[in-house]
Image: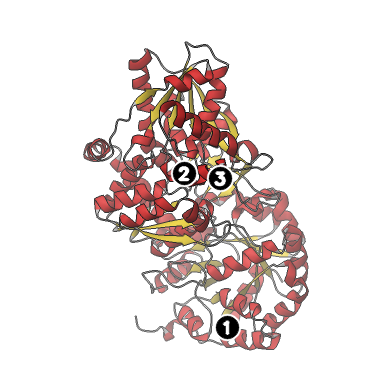
Amino acid sequence: MARRFGPYGGAYVPETLVPALVELESAWNFARRDPKFRSELRRLSETLGGRPTPLYFARNFTRRGRGAKVWLKREDLVHGGAHKFNNALGQGLLAARMGKPRLIAETGAGQHGVATAMIGAALGLETTIYMGEVDTIRQKPNVERMQLLGATVVPVRSGSRTLKDAINAALRDWIANVRTTHYLLGSAVGPHPFPSMVAEFQSVIGREIRDQSRRAFGRLPDLVVACVGGGSNAIGTFRPFLHSSVELLGVEAGGRRGSHGAASLTRGRPGILHGSYSYVLQDREGQVAETESVSAGLDYAGVGPEHAFLKDSGRVRYVSVSDSGAVRAFHWLAEDEGILPALEPAHALYAALREAKGRPAQENIVVTLSGRGDKDLEVVLGASR
Amino acid sequence: MRLADALRAARAAGRPIVVPYVMVDRSRARSLGRTVEALREGGANALELGFPFSDPIADGPVLEAAASRALRNRTGWRDLLAALRVTSELLPTAVMTYANPVWQEGLGPGLAELSRAGASGLIVPDLSLEESPAFRTESQRAGLSLVLLAAPGSGAARVQEIARASRGFLYVVSRYGTTGAATGRHASIDLRTIVRTAHDAAPSLPVLVGFGVRDRPSAARALASGADGVIVGTALEEMIRRKASPARITRWLRSIASAPRGRSESRAS
C-alpha cells in the first residue's frame, strides 16, 4: 500500500500512535484480501447501506445548462444520507476484527458522525464523536441524530471550533486510549494508512459510476465532477478513472468572495497537518489558517495527500466555487429535480453546470451527489433571506 | 555549553537531570530571561523552548491554550530567534515545535538559523522515526541534536532503534495521553522496561521522562524507572500564567531536582 503519493502523505504523528497505525495497516492488508471480510462488507453495503446507488439523468438540470448531459451519482441515497457510510462500515468492520470495543470520530457537517454512530450501533461498539462547537450549532439536526443513535457527542471549543479542531480533539483522545479505541477517520486525510484505506472504501462510488455509465449511455463519461474537502468522495469517485481518458474535476469551497474559503489545493501550499504532507491553507510561518465555508463538510484547511499528488501531476483539475454559487446550485437542483443536495456537493453541481454550458449535448458529465441537504435547510434559508 | 555535553556531564555527576519547558510568547519576551535564570538557579540542566503551533495534537489543554495565546499575541519565528539568543546564554536550549513550522522555514535554512541563534537541540513531537531521516540529516548539518521520542506502546525493537537514532537525549513519554492532561483509561505503565531497553541500546544517551511530571512526587516516580532525568512543562506554564515569582519557580524546580532517583528506590508495582 502506498505510504506516499509522490512527495505527499507519510505519517507525521506522535510516537504513541505509531503502533496503532502499524496494527491498522496490517489488519487492513489482511482484511482486504480476505474473502470473508469482503463478502461481509459487500453484504452490509447492500442490505444495510442500500448499495448500489443509482446513476440518475438530471433532465431538467441539464436543460438549465443547455449543453452536456448531467448525471447524478446518488450517494445521497446511501443509508444515513451520504457517502460517509461506505468508509464507516469498512473501518467499523475492521475495528471489530481488531477487537477494539470503542470508536471515535471527528465530524464537520455531521454526516460522518452520523455514519459512525450508525455503524457503532449496528456493530455494538461504544461511540464518541468530536464536533467543533460552531458545527454543532449549524448542523444541529445531525447532533440530535447521533445522540439518538447512541453516540456521545463532544463539542470542541478550541481553535476555530470547526472540523480541524475536531480532528485535533479526536487525535488526542486516540493518543490517550489507543489500545481500546479505533479512530474512524472520516476522510482520505491523516497519517498513512488512512488516505489509502479510506480511498479504497470509497472507490465503490467510481466503480459503480463506471459500470452504470456503460449501461446508461454505452461508454465512460466525458467528465466526472466531485467536491473536495478532505476529499474522500472525490478520491473514491476518481480512482477507478485515473488510468482512463475521462476528464476529472475536483471542486473546493471558495467561501465568501474575496476570502480564501477552504480551498487548500487552489489557494494553499504544501505543509504538514494532521499526520500527512499535503496542501494546507496556512500563513507564511506555517500556522494553519482558519477556514470559512458555508458547508461545514468542506470547511477544512487540509486535503488528502493523493489529491495533492493528482493536482501536481495535472491528472485532476481543481477549481473552487464560492458560498453563493453553492447556495444557488442547491436551489436549482431542488427546483429542477426535486432533490435537496447537501451544500458540499452543491459546489460540485455549480461547477458541473458551468462546464456543461460550454459542451455539446452528446457529452456526459457525472457529478457525485455525495449527500442530501436536509441538514442544511437552516443555513440555506438563512442565506436566502 | 551545548545540550548533549551538558546532559552527559550532569548524568556523570549522578544527579537527576531536569529540563523545564517554556513556551515562547511575544507578550512575555521581557520576563523570559528572569524566568530562565530562576530555572537555572533551581537546578535546570537545559531548557526546552517551545514554539507555538496552531494544531498541537500532542499537547493537553494547558499547553494548547498557551500556544493559542502566544499566536494571538503574534508570536512568530523571529520571536523564537530572539528568545534563543537570551536563553542559550543561560542554559543549553533545545527548540520544541511541531513539524510544519520548521518545514515552512525550509528545513536546512530554518535549522541553521536556529543553530546560529543559539539552539543546540530540536524536539518535534509529531515526527515519527519513519519520517525523521530528513530532519536528522539537516539537524546534524546544522549542529543540532535531534531528540526523538519513545512511547509506552513502542515495543523493545522500536525503542532500541529510536534510542540509537536519538541525539542529545531520549525523550520517553511516560504514558498514554497528551502533555499535562488527565491520564487515559490506562494510567500507569511500567517505564522501567523502556528505560532499560534504551540504556542498553544507547549506553551513553541520557534518558529523560516527560508528560505528567509536575512536582517532586511525580518526578520521584518517573526517576524510579531508572531514567536519568525528567522534563517538566505544564506545571511550569501554570505557574508562569499565575505570575509566580522567580523565587517560587526556583524553589519548585529545586524540589524536583533533588527528588530521589535510582533503580533501588523503585516503587512496587
Instruction: Report the number of numbered marks.
Output: 3
Judge if badges 3 and 1 mark residues of a common chain. no
Residue B269 x %, y %? 34, 80
Identify the residue under disc 1. B15
Q: Nearer the viewer, residue B82 or A163?
A: A163
Category of crowding for the residue at label 2, using alpha-carbon neighbours closer than 10 angstroms: few (below 14), some (14–19), many (at least 20) = many
Q: Residue, x 71% and y 79% (percent of image)?
A: B35
Q: Cα distance, mark 3 to mark 1?
A: 46 Å
Per the image, label 1 sits on a secondary structure element best described as: loop
Q: Which residue is mark 2?
A: A376
- Looking at the picture, do discs 2 and 1 lie on one chain? no
Point 73% across, 72% down: residue: B28
Question: Horizontal and vertical percent for residue A4?
Answer: 50, 39
Which three-letter amino acid code belongs to the residue tagged 1?
Answer: Arg
Q: Is residue B85 left or right of residue A7?
A: right
Cβ–Cβ under 8 Å for marks 2 and 3: no
Subunit bearing disc 2: A
Name the chain letter of the residue that bears numbered label 3.
A
Mark 3: amino acid: Gly
* Whether residue A104 is situated above or below residue B227 in the rendered picture: above
Within 10 Å of disc 3 (Cα), the crowding (few <14, some 14-19, many 20+) is: many
**Mark 2 or 3 closer to N-term?**
3
Q: At x 33% / y 27%, what residue is drawn?
A: A54
The disc at residue A302 is 3
Residue B185 locus on image (x, y percent): 36, 69
Please provide percent x and percent y for residue B74: 72, 61
Chain identity of mark 1: B
